[in-house]
Image (cartoon, helix red, strand yellow):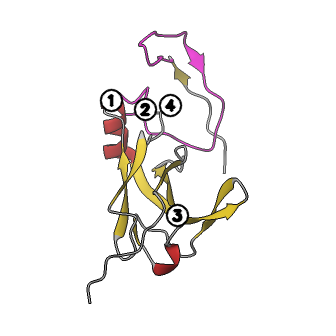
Amino acid sequence: MPLHRGRRYTPVRSDSIVGELRLSEPTEIIFPAQENDIILNLELPKVEMLALTGKAMEGDILTAVEVIPETETQQHVWSKYKKDVKYQWFCSTEMGDNKSFEPLPLQRSCSYKVRLEDIGCCLRCECIVTDVFGRSSDLAYAESAPVSPGLFLF
């Protein structure tokens, strides 16, 4: 694939300070130029925090919810350029004083049904957001309290 010649651009910082005119490096990737997108080409989708809804209780369902920054730029990035969000669930394993997490195979949706074997462990969900240009956000994660037994009435 041929390299496309560099483009001229004027960098603009997040505090609106305008820099000097520059020439970008040649690249194979072409970013579409659109109105008000000068800053967006520099910003990836961001997850301010990942929150878990539901209870860390056997039989309940935990759901990971992304909290995105309320800035106009991030709202625009998420609505226009977000491609997908990938999740992975983990279960804690105690090793001395250190808590580590093992991936739960095939648990890659935003929701997880808490199982009997999870009792006493902490659950963790990680997510990464990818934009339409193939760029990924920083990893965001949330951890549950230790899972408690469910309340079953007989």
Quarter holding residue 121 = bottom right
- Front-lying residue, 131 or 148: 148
**Circle 2 SS class:** loop
Q: Main secondary structure of the magenta part?
A: loop
The label shown at residue 40 is 2
Q: Position of residue 128 (x, y in %)?
A: 51, 52
| Outermost residue toward the right in this view | 96
In the image, what residue type sits under mark 2?
Answer: Leu
Q: Which residue is mark 4?
A: 42
The label shown at residue 20 is none
Residue 32 magenta: yes
In the image, what residue type sits under mark 4?
Answer: Leu
Task: Say left or right for 113 vs 106.
Answer: left
Mark 3 or mark 2, whichever is nearer to me: 3
Mark 1 or mark 4, whichever is nearer to me: 1
Q: Mark 1 to mark 4: distance in Å?
A: 15 Å
Mark 2 or mark 1, whichever is nearer to me: 1
Magenta segment: 11-39
Q: Position of residue 23 (x, y in %)?
A: 61, 21
Q: Are marks 4 and 2 in contact (CB under 8 Å)?
A: yes
Q: Are marks 1 and 4 in contact (CB under 8 Å)?
A: no
Q: Is 12 above or below relative to 42? A: above
**Circle 4 SS class:** loop
- Ranked by sequence position, the earlier of labels 1 and 4 is 4
Answer few, some or many: residues within 10 Å of disc 3's Cα (few below 14, many 20 plus, some between 14 and 19): many
